[in-house]
Image: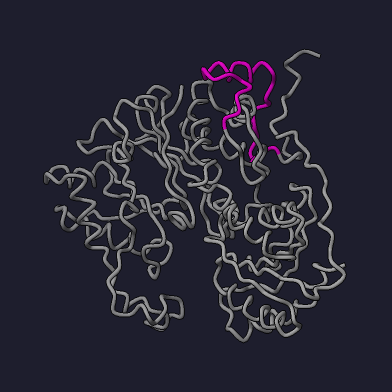
Amino acid sequence: MFERSWTDGLPVVPPTTERVRKMLAGTSRSADEIVVSVPPNLIECSVEKIAINAVMAGCKPEFLPVVISALETICTEEFNMHGVLATTMSVGPIFVVNGPIARDIGMNSGINVLGHGNRANSTIGRAVQLVINNVGGGGPGGVDRSTLGHMGKQGFCFSENELSSPWSSLAENRGYNSSQNVITAFTGEGPRLVMDQKSRTPESLIRTLAEHLISTVSSRIVVGMDAMLVLSPEHSARFHEAGWSKERFLEEIAAIMMIDTDNIIAGSGGIEEGLPAEMKGMSLPKFRPDGLLLVQAGGPAGLFSAIIGGWLNGPPGSEPTSKEILL
Amino acid sequence: MHDIDDIERRGIPAVMIASTPFEDAAQKQADALGLDVARVFVPHPIQDRTDGEMYEMADLVFNKVLDTLTR
Amino acid sequence: MTNEKVLLDPTSETAPSERSLSERPENMDGLTVGLLDISKGRGDIFLNRLEEKLSDTGIKVLRFKKPTFTKPAPVDLRHEIATKCDAVIEALAD
């Protein structure tokens, strides 16, 4: 299977008729239903084709609805998976699952949430990437032109820790309610740690987070790229305990991340990269409104959070996209 | 490539210009489309070039581009 | 052979039908060439030069620009180009 370019480089589970039949039992949708048109070759893809790739990725049948919905979020004009695939930047689709299904299928939102070791987290994103490769025809070195890539392109899917936070979830911020099963796709890099073990007040910690977020992709890029912030339980608690709402957090961090363009004009600080000279004297936000996606997840101990840098946002690039998961 | 494919489907001769690291990607996409899309490649990189260098690059491939559009 | 040995094909199982390029004119005399800018940095400068050189040889040039290099051009734009031009040059992908 590797020699036929059917894999991502790791061993896969052979998709026998029997295994695919069992996989298909995980969804109420019929095997021959065409659910998406897969880029880059825009191939119409049935539930069965997705099931075959889900078997190969190591999914359990109950993960299949999440895999199908993940594909429904990215195979859209707004998410622009073709562009995400073809870019030389180091990004891939990243999925956040909200709602009861995340707990029902045993997804990890705790220790090592952005890492390995959980079957659902490890295989759902992998199945999606296998579909892009095998059905859509988009693999590394072909249409995928990423200069560096990142390990999350093997498949990057995790869930939010919704139960132990007083704040609304990512899905709720995007217009869903807490009883709905929702998947959100974001185009992003690999995660990067932010350490702050000393801040005891929200006013101090938020400044640390902002300082690191400003450097995502390039500290000389403003408004153009989104980011995801994965706030750990201990960092979240600093804000919860001080009575901050999520809305307040997002407002205050946006206010801190207003950038004086004089500092990032091309040539300033001896750096040729930067904004054109005519943009001097302005104050611009690092992210567009709603361009910072906040997710709460991670293990109970550790005063660290993680930043996931994005890609070109909005209509010119990729829009974060959510869909309700159809069981 | 999808643009060129679409324009060619409408019966209009078309050519794409890209930088050399994209030769194999273009080949793969052409294979997938079933159309040997006319294409011309210029030296990489592009983003750090001066206007003068961009002009030289255009001069370099001008005749080649016209050749792909005529018999 | 039992079913356990049969693997299902994870690919699209489709092969594109091979097509040939549109018929090319003998030369460009009296024709209109569309220059399609994909909206990537520096491409406009490159196309400015191509426009100069095409105009110098008496070829009529029309300029078009798609909104973003990351997506195919909108269908309306492709239609407009096809109705106004006899040939198209798209640049510059890097």
Q: Position of residue A218 (x, y in %)?
A: 42, 66
Q: Where is residue A125 in the image (x, y as percent from the top left)?
A: 52, 37
Is A48 on the left-hand or right-hand side of B24? left
Predominant SS of the magenta segment:
loop
Residue A198 visible: no
Q: What stretch is highlighted in magenta?
A: A6-35
Quadrant location of the N terminus of chain B? bottom right
Q: How many labels does the image show?
A: 0
| Residue drawn at (33%, 46%) of the image | A230
A234 in relation to A22, above or below: below
| Residue drawn at (14%, 53%) of the image | A201
Task: Report if residue A45 lies within the magenta region.
Answer: no
Quadrant location of the C terminus of chain B? bottom right
Q: Relative to the observer, which residue lies in front, A33 or C64? A: C64
A11 in relation to A137, above or below: above
Task: Report if residue A26 lies within the magenta region.
Answer: yes
Name the outermost residue toward the left: A242
A261 in relation to A240, above or below: below
Q: Where is residue A113 in the image (x, y as percent from the top left)?
A: 39, 39
Q: Where is residue C42 in the image (x, y as percent from the top left)?
A: 57, 75
Residue B15 visible: yes
